Image: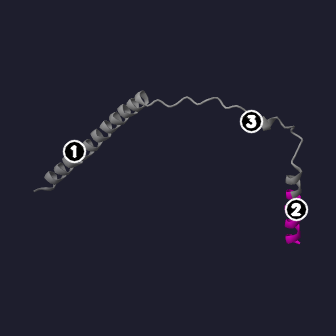
Amino acid sequence: MGSSELLEEGFELMLLGMGSVFIFLIVLVFITTIMSRLLTRFFPEPVAAPKVAPKSAAVAVGSVDPELVAAIGAAIKQHRARRG
């Protein structure tokens, strides 16, 4: 076999391989699209109920839990004591 025949056979194998991969990917895209359409047709997503704001959100903006303030103050005091 000459080098030109080997080169020609190499190109044939390359085109065959690349062509088969390309066709496989095209088929994969079509199958995925069909599956997606079937799933959305037979299993639609449930409609979410509208969210109602909790009643605790009606608390005044300026009010803060005194226990939370005490805990934050104690944490700051402890942090400052460790830093020296």
Distance of label 3 from label 1 (alpha carbons): 64 Å
Residue 40 in the image: above or below residue 83: above
Q: Which residue is mark 3?
A: 54
- Marks 3, 1: nearer the viewer: 3
SS at mark 3? loop
Q: Nearer the viewer, mark 1 or mark 2?
A: 2
Q: Quadrant of the C terminus?
A: bottom right
- The residue located at (30%, 37%) in the rendering is 27
How many neighbours does mark 2 have within 10 angstroms: few (below 14), some (14-19), or many (20 or more)?
few
Start and end of the magenta stretch?
A: 71-84
Q: CA distance from mark 1 to mark 2?
A: 74 Å
User: In front: 49, or 10?
Assistant: 49
- Secondary element at image label 1: helix
Queried whether the magenta region covers residue 75, the answer comes back as yes
**Direction from residue 35 to residue 71 in the image, left or right:** right
Residue under numbered circle 2: 74
Q: Residue at x 43, y 31 (%)?
A: 43
Mark 3 vs mark 1: which is more N-terminal?
1
Reading the chain from its start, which is encountered first: label 2 or label 3? 3
Question: Can you identify the residue that label 1 sits on?
Answer: 16
Q: Residue 51, percent across and down?
A: 67, 32
The reply to whether the C-beta atoms of the residues labelled 2 and 3 are less than 8 Å apart is no
Name the outermost residue toward the front. 55
Q: Amino acid at mark 1?
A: Leu
Query: What's under tag 2, amino acid-wise?
Result: Ala
Q: Residues within 10 Å of mark 3 (few under 14, many from 20)?
A: few
Q: Earlier in the sequence, mark 1 or mark 2?
A: 1
Percent from the top left, x then y, of residue 21?
Answer: 28, 44
- Inter-mark Cα distance, 2 to 3: 30 Å
Find residue 36 and name its label: none
Instruction: Find residue 20 and report its horizontal and vertical position in percent.
Output: 25, 43
Tell me which colouring the rendered structure shows: one colour
